[in-house]
Image: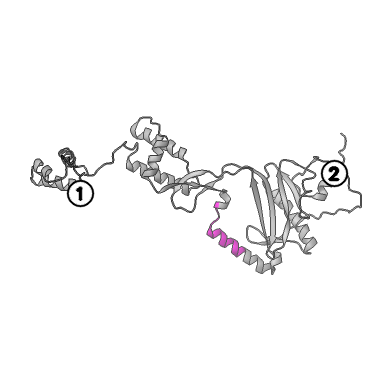
Amino acid sequence: MISVISIFQMVATIEQIREAVQRVLSGESNAAVVRSSQVKRTTLFKFLKATNNSEVIERKKSGRKPSLPNGVEQDLVSWIAAMQRAGCPVTRHDIMMKAQQIVQLHSGITQNLGRGWYQRFSQRHQELSDRIAQSLTKARNNVDKDGIILYFNRLLKACLAFNCSPSDIYNVDETSFKTKNSSKKVVAIRGSQSVWATEKSVPYHLTIVAAVAADGTFVPPAFILPGLTCEAVVLDECAVHDAVVTTAPKAFINAHIFNNWLETFGEWKMKYRGCRPAVLDTVGTESWIKTREVVREDVLFLPAKPVVRKRIKTNSEWHSIKDLYAAASKRQKRK
């Protein structure tokens, strides 16, 4: 019976290669070093040449070499992190386009970098990961600690000056609803808890102005619709009494609409609380809001049959459901 024994030579480690090179530099012959170590003759000659050229002795990975040097790739990772901190996180396509520009500037040739390059790039840099960026408006992201402290101090000063109770302090906010979700998949630093993107488009189609007192009492909501007109039956399905509606070109609130809302809010507060509102202006001095007194005679009449789909002009004024029906039933004068 004949047995065949295969002898495999173990691959030399980088430490064994460095030791073999040092033995040759100390005076031993190449053949003696090869016979007494696991380093092959070709490997020994290769690293001896690298040592004579003052190169670092290291074992390089097999396969295709990266299109960008290691230092340039680190700069690309730093650029990705900087764009994330600025609120403009980049996508895979942005990274590939930026890498192609760097290759063209670095080597002077045009090279298309696709999904394969990006996959190898992400494997080399495990600190990068795919995330979903949360959309934040620029105004919301600009809120800082100093601004909150200043707001709190002014609110405290106003409450003490006017001897306010919880029923006199209102928190007013306007919330816009979007027609689509602009969140997108981006590349960010792995483990980071703040991944957001500044909104560049304005896809709002509806704005609601809400006010709630510190004691829990809420003010009827105010709706801002896009355009110049709205349907007369727009508030028919609203379950909240005394809700109002107006229009704006892009459903955004502006100074004129907000001032009109303050007047409407003053009428509501006088009706249900028996007093007018007071605010703290931007320069820090207390002032009373001067509201226009709207004097109207209440006439008893049978409500006219509402005209379905009839539209009325709001002129940025707030209208209740009663005002909408009155405007819809009003006859147009002939020219």
For residue 146, which quarter of the picture?
bottom right
- Residue that numbered label 2 is attached to: 306
For residue 248, which quarter of the picture?
top right
Magenta residues span 141-154
How many residues crowd around disc 1 within 10 Å: few (fewer than 14), some, or many (20 or more)? few
Viewer-side residue, 93 vs 4: 4
For residue 95, which quarter of the picture?
top left
Find the distance from the CA under tag 2 to the CA under tag 1.
92 Å
Residue 318 location, x and y as percent? 76, 49
- Disc 1, SS: helix
128 relative position to 66: left or right: right
Residue 265 inside the magenta-drawn segment = no
- Disc 2, SS: loop
User: Can residue 139 be seen in this snapshot?
Assistant: yes
Viewer-side residue, 316 vs 96: 96
Question: Residue, x 47% and y 49% (percent of image)?
Answer: 85
- Residue that numbered label 1 is attached to: 15
Question: Residue, x 61% and y 63% (percent of image)?
Answer: 154
Amino acid on which disc 2 is placed: Pro
